[in-house]
Amino acid sequence: MSVHPLNESFDILGEWYLPENPSRKLAGKLLYTPERTELHLNEAFQPLRGKIYSGGSEQSYPVIYGTTIKGEAITLLDVLQIGVSFNIGSGGMKQPEQLISSWLVVGAHVPPDFAYPQISFRVPALQVWLSRKIIEYSFGNEQAPGPFSQSYRILPVNVETNPIPSIDATLDWAISWNSNFDVFTSISVEVSAWVTIKPSSPKTIEWYFEQQSTIAAMLAFLSGVPMSPDCIEASIGEPHHNVSVLVTMRDAYYCTFKNLHDFYMPRSAMGVDLNEVVARWFEVYRKVHMPSQLALSVLASEKLWLHVEFLSLMQALEGFHRGLFDGNYMEGDGYESVKKTLSDAIPTELASDHKDALRSRIKYGTRFHCASD
């Protein structure tokens, strides 16, 4: 199966049909871009008949299957009609239909509610953040005197597995590589890293993307920049048969870091086991989801005014604190002496209404939201 990166556009011709009517295949072109997936059919699945009204309801399809001219199986999920036109010419009338899809699966025909055993996400620069060198370089001469030589060796790297009890799944961190060379002119090795989500039982595609967003938030905070995946592969339960999943990633940002010092905190500088970090993050993420999204939007934004960036990150930090800790600075019993000290310190020359206002605020001073109370 060919790899289909999320950030590379393509178009391909094929025949397309609805699962409930496989005998009626329509010719058309599939167009994928990082912004959207469109299917342009030469005919409509549901030809318009009778009276035609403007502003009619849009047709939707849970799933559409296709086979490309290269014989590759395609599945479009959550498909919405965006237009049907009429063309009348010497050959008769045609009703081309245009559709847009939320999810695109390349490599198999799968039902809308299909449960996948595992899904892998390739993340640019993840291989650097993991701090696991895979290319070894040496220079010298094995027998002196003699000519010097340069050698490059690809080191074996094992898959690292993290159990995630809170979602009853494991994460696999794997590094892969591709090489190209000829014996006379060139050699190149391209290294990439994948994170694979493996639940104890198969899950729908939506579940995997919820977990992926949790991983992406964690990596963004550790690296200092968003780290979106640029390629997605899913297992469909058949040996040696994975499929490509293509979906529009909102606010996708592909990390381009190449050195450890580029990251805010690479894995090698954490000082704590990755198992512990990942498991704990999945436990608390629901409590800090909203401030996480705010922080991620700031990290992904460019040319923000410095004071806007600072205040937004401070608001996100406040949200983290409120999500992870109780809403009181101290317990009520311990606050009584503090409240008395503050009340006694109110100047006697203040107006009575001013004193009452201050005492009201002091009464709730142990809470983070004392002003609103």
Image (cartoon, rainbow, N blue to C red):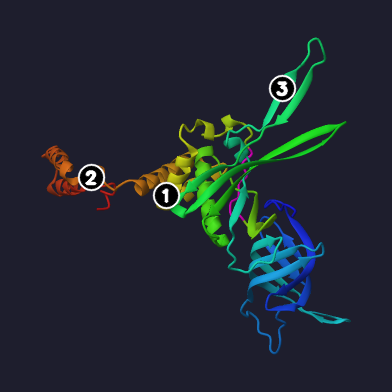
First in sequence: mark 1 vs mark 3 = 3
Looking at the image, which residue is at 78% across and 11% down? 144
Q: What is the magenta segment's predominant secondary structure?
A: loop
Q: Which residue is mark 3?
A: 138
- Where, by quadrant of the figure, is residue 44 drawn? bottom right
* Helix, strand or loop for disc 3: strand
Residue 192 picture location, percent across and down: 66, 41
User: Which label belongs to residue 283?
Assistant: 1
- Mark 2 vs mark 1, foreground winner is 1
Residue 290 picture location, percent across and down: 44, 52
Decide whether residue 253 is among the magenta residues: yes
The span picked out in magenta is: 249-256
Q: Residues within 10 Å of mark 1 (few under 14, many from 20)?
A: few
How far apart marks 3 and 2 lie (CA) works out to: 62 Å
* Helix, strand or loop for disc 1: helix
Looking at the image, which residue is at 17% across and 41% down? 334
Residue type, mark 3 in image: Ser
Q: Which residue is mark 2?
A: 366
